[in-house]
């Protein structure tokens, strides 16, 4: 039986990283953020500091808690600095080859007992597990965006994972105050397999001029009680990530509604990835 998870590494410095790091550090774990550059890792810590400082100003967070959370976060650009981790969560770009390459490197650098979790939205976890060289100690731990507000994690069990690994991730997720859903290693798991055909259908609807993107967003918020409309959500998730998710869903299930709409492909080809690049379906200043 592996020791309880105390020190956690988070690899990647994109949209998902800061939220995940904050949640884990706030729950009392030491967290090492690893990005390809030290500046990238420090930017994650700074983003958390900015968010927590705003909460302190509004009286929604105690300044001692802010300092304690930040004090548990360290930054590095070296994978070998993750050798003290009991768990490493990868949050890099949604690309199978890049994640497999990272998994192989993590497999070489981490302690034997360490578990590797992937935050992939759709990719086959078993293929990442095999690439790591420690397939029994790899599973999916799928956080949602932003992790500080969305408490769900999908714990994804590839056929290679051991019972101990899944039990350790359950224990860890509970200590991070997460709502847990267990799910098999199928593209999109539960949430994205249901969500992305809907988002793709919204693009098709706008393209055939049923209504504008503003009207479609307003209709889905007002009529279904969704907190965000489909175009707001696509721009928040990232259009490059959204395209990868639809491609992975279509590869696995072959359903017509999962073929990425050409309008999405064109935006991605133009480098318009949504909020993170300042332009997607809408423009952000
Ligand atoms: N965006 C979302 O709403 C969301 C929600 C849940 C899960 N996810 C998943 O989380 C993961 C990260 O998504 P994100 O939205 O944070 O992505 P992002 O595009 O914001 O960030 C990607 C990260 O990957 C790094 N990266 C890019 N190329 C790399 C390479 N060749 N080697 C190593 N690192 C590289 C980038 O530097 C960046 O830190 C993906 O697997 C995605 O499916 C995303």
Image (spheres, grey):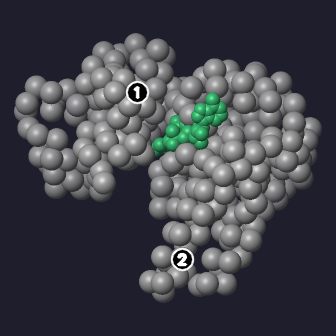
* Badge 1 element: helix
Q: Nearer the viewer, residue 273 or 37?
A: 37
Q: Distance of mark 2 from mark 1, alpha carbons?
A: 34 Å
Asked whether, in this view, residue 158 is left or right of residue 194, the answer is right
On screen, residue 155 above or below 271:
below
Q: Which of 266 and 120 is in front in this view?
A: 266
Quadrant position of the C terminus in the picture? bottom left
Residue at position x 8%, y 38% from top?
211
Q: Residue furthest left?
A: 210
Asked whether, in this view, residue 222 is left or right of residue 40, the answer is left
- Residue 148 placement (x, y as % from top left): 52, 61
Asked whether, in this view, residue 115 is left or right of residue 210, the answer is right
- Residue 16 placement (x, y as % from top left): 54, 48
Total numbered labels placed on residues in the image: 2
Whether residues under marks 2 and 1 lie with C-beta atoms below 8 angstroms apart, the answer is no
The label shown at residue 243 is 1
Residue at position x 75%, y 67% from top?
72
Crowding at label 2, few (<14), some or many (≥20) Cα neighbours within 10 Å? some
* Badge 2 element: helix
Crowding at label 1, few (<14), some or many (≥20) Cα neighbours within 10 Å? many
Location of residue 69 by image quarter: bottom right
The label shown at residue 53 is 2
User: Which of the marked residues, 2 or 1, is nearer the chain's N terminus?
Assistant: 2
Dividing the image into four quarters, tell me where ligand 1 lies.
top right
Residue at position x 45%, y 28% from top?
245
- Residue 49 placement (x, y as % from top left): 59, 69
On screen, residue 117 above or below 4:
above
């Amino acid at each position: 039986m592996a020791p309880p998870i105390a020190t956690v590494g988070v690899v990647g410095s994109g949209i998902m990283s800061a939220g995940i790091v904050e949640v884990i550090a706030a729950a009392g774990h030491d967290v090492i953020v690893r990005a390809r550059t030290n500046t990238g890792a420090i930017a994650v810590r700074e983003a958390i500091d900015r968010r927590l400082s705003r909460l302190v100003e509004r009286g929604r967070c105690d300044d001692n808690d802010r300092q304690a959370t930040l004090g548990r976060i360290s930054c590095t650009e070296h994978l070998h600095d993750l050798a003290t981790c009991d768990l490493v969560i990868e949050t890099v770009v949604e690309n199978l080859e890049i994640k497999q390459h990272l998994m192989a490197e993590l497999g070489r650098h981490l302690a034997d007992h360490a578990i590797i979790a992937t935050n992939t939205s759709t990719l086959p976890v078993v293929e990442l597990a095999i690439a790591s060289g420690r397939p029994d100690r790899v599973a999916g731990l799928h956080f949602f965006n932003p992790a500080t507000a969305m408490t769900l994690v999908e714990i994804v069990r590839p056929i290679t994972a051991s019972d101990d690994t899944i039990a350790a991730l359950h224990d860890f997720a509970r200590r991070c105050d997460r709502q847990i859903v267990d799910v098999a290693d199928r593209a999109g798991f539960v949430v994205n397999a249901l969500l992305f055909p809907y988002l793709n259908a919204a693009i098709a609807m706008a393209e055939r001029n049923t209504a504008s993107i503003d009207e479609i967003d307003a209709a889905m918020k007002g009529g279904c009680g969704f907190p965000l409309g489909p175009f707001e959500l696509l721009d928040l998730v990232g259009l490059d990530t959204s395209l990868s998710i639809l491609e992975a869903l279509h590869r696995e299930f072959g359903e017509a509604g999962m073929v990425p709409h050409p309008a999405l492909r064109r935006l991605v080809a133009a480098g318009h990835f949504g909020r993170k690049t300042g332009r997607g379906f809408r423009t952000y200043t």
